[in-house]
Amino acid sequence: MEKDFEGKTALVTGGSRGIGRAVCLDLAKGGARVAVNYTSNAEAAEETVQTIIKNGGEASAFKADVSDPEEVQKMVAETEKTFGPIDLLVTSAGIVRRENHETLSFEIWKEIMEVNLDGTFLPVMAIKDGMLKRGFGRIVCIASIAGLRPRPNNIAYSASKAGVIGFVRSCSEALAPSIRINCLAPGLIETDMISTLAPEKRKAMIEATPIPRTGTVEEMANVVHFLLSEKASFVTGQTYVADGGRVTLP
Ligand code: NAP
């Protein structure tokens, strides 16, 4: 495997589980020193770190709630103290609460916005000035096809992910040319996040996908790898959809 990220420092929010975990393993394989962020599942974060170390890589876990400005600042400072300036950032921390217009409360709306949208804004803002000063930065924010399609039973989540896409698009112009920033918009991916999906809903979603299955976290990490690497050297401000073709259908 090519060492696309040799000598680089990477921070992955939500790196303890799911898509973020697969991104951490992939970046470490590519030669990066990896800061694995988590908020509550220390065991999962440590498992990710130990897997990387066992495979000959460098990693450490950093606890921080991405929706808390002080915790994010502290996580960035500790990461840079441990591994040096952050070159690569992936924001994968996220939550879902499937509520329709009748059940969605303002509290749930705010919770989702805080983790998914503030939790994208805060790490990017905390890291961008250092990247600009050094003239190098690569960022991928994990959005969702829910940010591109209507989701009547997932209104707040859908709005938060559309927000991420808009934020990234505007940042791409503001931060160019030193920083490239893109989104990945996954479809249905096999992680803890979809374990609460009702079986009939899951079946219907898979049947409505031209490649009729769930995606894997490794498939997501492959796209993130490309977007962070110099193979994507002319790509910024984009939303790369990886969803088995679901978003193209009505
Ligand atoms: P997951 O398996 O549920 O993992 C969620 C991760 O986010 C965990 O590492 C968790 O940390 C972390 N996290 C949650 N709240 C946090 C907070 N406040 N501060 C810091 N970390 C926090 O989820 P996933 O499926 O990998 O999802 C990753 C991203 O992809 C999310 O942004 C999600 O919206 C997006 N996405 C997922 C799918 C899908 O089908 N799975 C589809 C489209 C988009 P702990 O381990 O400490 O809890």
Image (cartoon, rainbow, N blue to C red):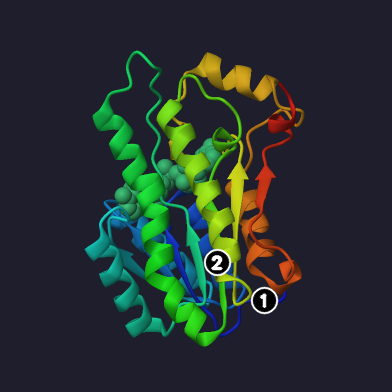
Residue count near mark 1 (Cα–Cα under 10 Å), binned few <14, some 14–19, many ≥20: some
Q: Where is residue 146 in the image (x, y as percent from the top left)?
A: 55, 33
Image point 62% across, 59% down: which residue?
224
Whether ligand 1 has any atom under 8 Å from the Cβ at mark 2 is answered as no
Q: Are the two marked residues, 1 and 2, in contact with CB atoms closer than 8 angstroms?
A: no
Assign a secondary structure to mark 2: helix
Q: Position of residue 108 (x, y in %)?
A: 29, 31
The residue singled out by tag 1 in the image is: 4
Q: Position of residue 230 (x, y in %)?
A: 71, 73
Residue 239's disc number: none
Is 87 left or right of 122, judged from the image as shown? right
Image point 60% across, 44% down: which residue?
185
**Circle nearer the viewer, 1 or 2:** 2
In the image, what residue type sits under mark 2? Answer: Ala
In the image, 76 versus 39, the foreground residue is 76
In the image, what residue type sits under mark 1? Answer: Asp
* Residue 136 appears anywhere in the view: yes
Residue count near mark 2 (Cα–Cα under 10 Å), binned few <14, some 14–19, many ≥20: few
The residue singled out by tag 2 in the image is: 174
* Residue 190 appears anywhere in the view: no
Is 197 left or right of 112, judged from the image as shown? right
